[in-house]
Image (cartoon, rainbow, N blue to C red):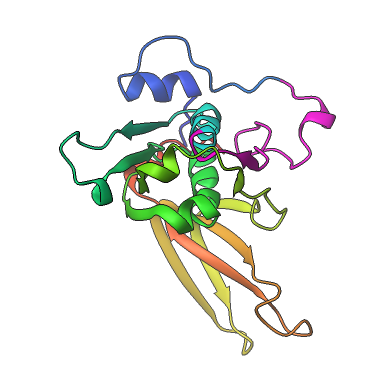
Amino acid sequence: MTAPLTPDEILELLGITGESDFVPEPVPLEEQPFGLTANGYAVPGGFTGTLAAALTWLDAHLRVGDVRITAPSADAAPQERAYLVEIVTGGYSDDEALVYRVERSNLGEWFWESRHRGGRLVLTVPEDMYLSTDVSTWVEEPSDVLQTVHHAAQVVLHAPDGTEQVLVTPEGAQLRFEDRAGHSRVDRPTGVLHVEPLTTDQSIWFLS
């Protein structure tokens, strides 16, 4: 079995030159109240502020990806003027985890336009809201449950009768447990276990 690729070897394979920033630096415990990501970085908290500031915050917390904003066309009708916001992760696991939270926050629920394979989320933000100085919570703080993410090449389901079902994912899969407390009776299970197959582009970024 060959040794796992190092972060710099992954960058070289992808044709990305320059010094890698993938190796995490030690983070004091008091600065990681929400734990660490799969790659050893402090999990970002939530964000409350203006909408434009929320996008700036998000861009600053994407380690591989970025936020690309296209202003509305000058000749667009007033009621159709909107900013196109593209959030790109490249499939990198830490960025994908953050964008997953964004999709289920006010930012994603209000402005969601489309989601694309390979790590691209598109939002359409009306111009008046983008320029607004109103303050809101756009990204909620993470819960411990939502940050429980594992990466597997094979998933085995054990049935009550003792039988097993095996799901093989050649490029790996992301297993994510979502808490839905409040949507079901408190004396019954409320969580949902998601099994999300990875693409080739995504799997190369998972370092753990």
Nearest the eye: 121 or 27:
121
Q: Residue furthest bottom?
A: 161
Nearest the eye: 25 or 5:
25
- In the image, residue 195 lies at what x, y percent? 49, 63
Query: Is 55 within the magenta?
Result: no
- In the image, residue 40 lies at what x, y percent? 65, 32
Task: Specify whether 87 is left or right of 33.
Answer: left
Q: Is residue 109 above or below residue 133?
A: below
Corner quadrant of residue 175 = bottom right
| Residue drawn at (68%, 40%) of the image | 45
| Residue drawn at (47%, 53%) of the image | 108
Residue 154 shows in this picture = yes
Magenta span: helix, strand or loop, mainly? loop
Please provide the residue range marked out in magenta.
Answer: 26-52
- In the image, residue 120 lies at what x, y percent? 35, 44
Q: Quadrant of the C terminus?
A: top right
Task: Specify whether 45 is left or right of 78.
Answer: right
- In the image, residue 188 lies at what x, y percent? 73, 84
Q: Is residue 113 above or below residue 207?
A: below
